[in-house]
Image (tube, rainbow, N blue to C red):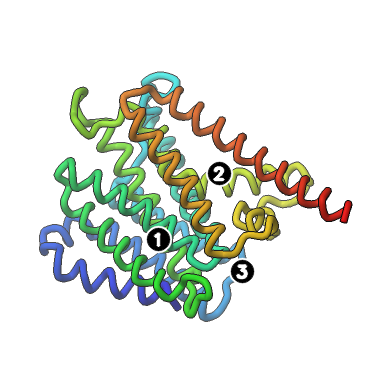
Amino acid sequence: MGGLSIFLGAVLTMGMGLSLEDWINLKYFFIALALMFIIGLRDDILALSAKQKLYSQFLPLLVLVFLDRTILQSTYGVGGEFVFPEVVSMGLTIFVLLILTNAYNLIDGLDGLAGTIGGMILVCLGVWFFEIGNMPLALVSFTFSGSLLAFLYFNWQPSKIFMGDTGALMIGLLISYLTIKFINVNYALPDGHTFKFNSSVGTAICLLIIPIFDTSRVIIVRLRKFQSPFKADKNHVHHQFIGLGFTHAQSVLFIATIGIFFISIAVLLRKQPDWLIISIALAGCVSINYVLKHAQWKRIKHGTEN
């Protein structure tokens, strides 16, 4: 029930920090977040089937897209300046929100991992929103990152409490929503703005590299084995680290370091175009996957020889 404590801690703090006007302006976002919280809580208390959990997530996503108007509107400079028709924008946004929310949920497999990665992402987004003057979203980001930090105190190996779907789905939706806000707001900033990233999409990919890389890798592995992409297995990145003999804490620190590395690349190359940032992110993911496979092969070979 760690997700419940994360939610209550954040809501209490936002109640003291956000003005009534901010609550009104963000009302549809908070409704969507509350709905996702209820879906996760229902699943933790009385498990939903995979299809039930998937279909129920469309309700908060529809609230964000149709009522809050959180929409991916164009290619943002990736492959040109193509603006999507509204129906395409809505469909694409729902798909992206669904994938990113569940991608974050999938990394919740080790003590401290989801909390560490989520907190790291939210701090980065909070700093950026603060620097451009969007105080409501900065406060939301910092509030949930602080709540995750308190949760990590009890979730670090050996953990006394777990995030569950209550927390993972809620934080996944929060991160997905804020990332789309970042892409739209950053792209609209005037050229030459101190905190404008020339690569809106590439920067977002680097920021969410851990859940994106892990989910993409798992789906590719399953499809190569002619298995359903929704089939549970032990092929996640954190499972690979555990298989190499690392503890939960060591694995979390290594994975967090990978995330920090990619975020640092996005910051250092913030004036570079999307194709370069995305190419570096793709090359980095392929390299990490190769290193993990090679390390596993050496471990298996060494064990066989012994």
Q: Quadrant of residue 71?
A: top left
State whether residue 213 is above or below residue 235: above
* SS of the residue under disc 3: loop
- Residue located beneath label 2 in the image: 213
Amino acid at circle 3: Ser
The residues tagged by marks 2 and 3 sit, at their Cα atoms, a distance apart of 25 Å
Q: Give x and y (percent) for residue 97.
A: 44, 49
Q: Nearer the viewer, residue 216 or 71?
A: 216
Which quadrant would the C terminus be assigned to in this image? bottom right
Residue at point 42%, 45% (across, down): 260
In this orientation, does residue 95 appear? no
Q: Nearer the viewer, residue 24 or 302?
A: 302
Of the numbered discs 2 and 3, the one sitting upstream in the chain is 3
* SS of the residue under disc 1: helix
Residue 49 got which mark? 3
Q: Residue furthest front?
A: 306
Residue 171 got which mark? 1
State whether residue 11 is above or below residue 101: below
Mark 1 surroundings within 10 Å by alpha-carbon count, few (fewer than 14), some (14 through 19), many (20 or more): many
- In this picture, residue 129 sits left or right of residue 177: left
State whether residue 43 is above or below residue 259: below
Of the numbered discs 3 and 1, the one sitting upstream in the chain is 3
Q: Give x and y (percent) for residue 231.
A: 69, 57
